[in-house]
Amino acid sequence: MSTAVTAQPGAKSAAKFSCEQAARAALGEPAKREGAELVYRCPHPEGHKDGDSHPSLKINPKKNVWACFPCGASGTAWSLAAFLAGCDPGDKVAVTAWLVERGLFSGTKPKRKADGRGPCVATYVYTDVVGKSIARKLRFEPGPKGKAKDFSWERWEGGKWVSGLGDPKISTPLYRVAKIINESFAVLTEGEKDTDAGANLGLPTATSGGTGSWREDHAECLRGKSVVIVADADEPGRVEAQKRAASLYGKAASVRVCEIPDCKDLAKAIESGWTRERLLSLFSEMPEWKPATGAEILDAVMRFIRRFVSLTEAQARAVALWVAHTHAFGAAASTPYLAVNSAEKQSGKTRLLEVSRLLVSRAWFTGRTSAAVLTRKIDAEHPTLLLDESDAAFGGEKEYAEALRGILNTGYRLGGAASCCVGQGVNITPKDFSTFCPKAIAGIGKLPDTVIDRSIPIRLKRARRGEVARFREREAQREGPEIAARLATWCAANLETLRQARPEIPAQLSDRQADTSEPLLAVADLAGGDWPKAARQSLVKLCGEAQADDDSIGVKLLSDIKGIFAEKEGDEIPSGELCEALAKIETSPWGEWAKGKPLSPAKLARLLKPFDIFPGQIKNGLARGYRLGDFREAFSLYLPPSPPIESVKVSETRESRGDGELLKVSNESPSDTLKNAVSPNKDAASRHFDTLKAGIGGQENGEKEAKTLPFQEVREVLDV
């Protein structure tokens, strides 16, 4: 063709499109920008001995003109279309066909403003492996009515473009598949814009489209190739990249996943000056992608958190499981809150939320918002709420504090809602807003009791100097989001398994603690490794400590009495002796119960009366006191059961001793799992069995009134 292209008289009025639209439709994103001009690599070889390695096709969008000085070509939109189509501008049929194919001709709706959309600014034609057109995607700028649909699809049918992908819908192949099918190396981007930008730079790029467009059959087009997946630098982009990597693993010769530093995507990187050589160097430095097990991913989450926050082993495991739960939230019917508090400032509360923000799903990190925003955002987006300075929130504006309290009281279970009035004037109507979402609440002091009941407590202490690394978010951004993406991919692949999971709940957890712990234990069981065992130990430890701190004075009294009976020989105790034993417990208030004086038998009886426990005659009527059997119901209702004692195996051996039977206890090879948890109770059990033995053996002259509980009842009351 002639390199001297000029505008065709009268042609401008025949087509309503701009130079920029024509260039984007044919060439995608510009290679770079120079002031007000967009600069592309010229697609024609004439005048470009070096293949136009230094882009020379320039477009001025404001003046709607273009020029390529090495080619000696310039003009307006029509002449640019002819130049890009490779035909004479006077050949209206050829130029029009080129415009029609790209949706730029006035007769085929060049400007689609319906539904609030602006003009069509790009057209992406999908072909099969031999280059035959199948479908195309039209990209629109948002119109004055606001953002509606940014894209629409058309299919090639009967020699023309028809709206939609048909019914059933056409399964589109990879975009630019014909260009990379014979290549041994391919770069997979998230969207067509990035793909065109990479192709203009000489990279073998392809894509399935945006987030959620990937299908398993797309991997077949890349089988045997070395594939680099360029992830968009946001949470959906990272998750999408991990999903594609998992699909390609074992099919492609190698898979690498990378983000371009300080750039959202490939198009932005090229626009900011990244060259082909620099990108290829970055790709070659990336390690090969390999799938990780659930246990490995959770280990990575825990290590990342503990690098910046001082946590105990139990706390770190609970937080890691909670982070995973935010990505598997769709499978849960309840959600535990993470209650992060400390006695003093500068203990790492805010830091834990900052680190968690890099790992959780749909993070919303806030210290203060309005009641309306809080309610509506949770309902619309179901984010992971990372609420800092909760003590200020509950002690501040009453409306906000009550709204927050209501959301926390109902938002731990599926179906939880807060009711508000919406509308104006006579159109005001009540509406239920969903409050169900993962939440972490940080603050100094104690949260409301109703929130604590639904929380896993993480009580922080100040880190020792040098114990944790300094948190620099820009540096942490390089690792945290990648771990989060792997975690999200793993959870998404196992969502149905988690939804059907019914994990075994430790008996030490209360009913509400069991409800909130269940989704975390489901994740731990799915991860495998040491996580199922360690998760249960961690949750029992954290929830047990919280329960002890939160117990009422009556429950505290029952717990202390149970401990006293466990250390005492016999199943009876005089009231005075019991009060003396209670007063010796330094961690309880009984030693200074009434104006600095110890708890008296009369006041002890008053405290036990609500539990239907009353003093009576003991020791042949010589004293008044309490029997262990009187506490059976109260212990079972208000105290958590002790851990099962697998290390204590009871064997029965008959030995003649009066008219009784001797029951011997043999301690054999305690299991490693429960050894530490049961050792105190094991000794207590032995003492009670010795007492039982003495009581039975001491019966003389056919005395039938036993002074000790039967063997099985001793075990039941003390849970040993």
Image: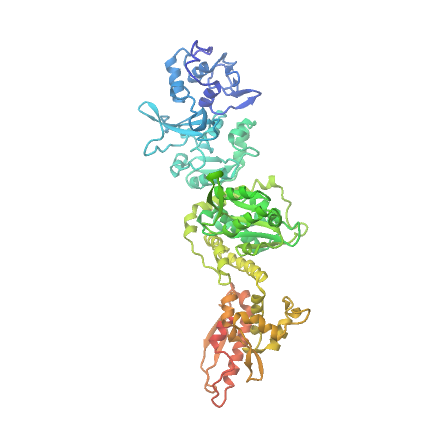
At 62% from the left and 77% from the top, the residue drawn is 576
Q: Is residue 584 above or below residue 274?
A: below
Whether residue 212 sits left or right of residue 355 in the image: it is: left
Residue 469 at what x, y percent from top left?
64, 46
Which residue is the extreme one toward the front? 426
Q: Is residue 553 above or below residue 85?
A: below
Whether residue 581 can be seen here: yes
Q: Is residue 139 above or below residue 508?
A: above
Which residue is the extreme one toward the top? 9
At 38% from the left and 13% from the top, the residue drawn is 92
Total of numbered circles in the picture? 0
Its colouring scheme is: rainbow
Q: Quadrant where the N terminus lies?
A: top left
Q: Quadrant of residue 479?
A: top right
Whether residue 719 can be seen here: no
Which residue is the extreme one toward the bottom? 701
Whether residue 89 sits left or right of residue 305 in the image: it is: left
Q: Quadrant of residue 446?
A: bottom right
Judging depth in this view, the residue of 530 and 637 nearest the camera is: 637
Judging depth in this view, the residue of 378 and 568 nearest the camera is: 378
Residue 384 at what x, y percent from top left?
52, 45
At 50% from the left and 65% from the top, the residue drawn is 671
Residue 373 at what x, y percent from top left?
54, 41
Residue 449 at what x, y percent from top left?
56, 56
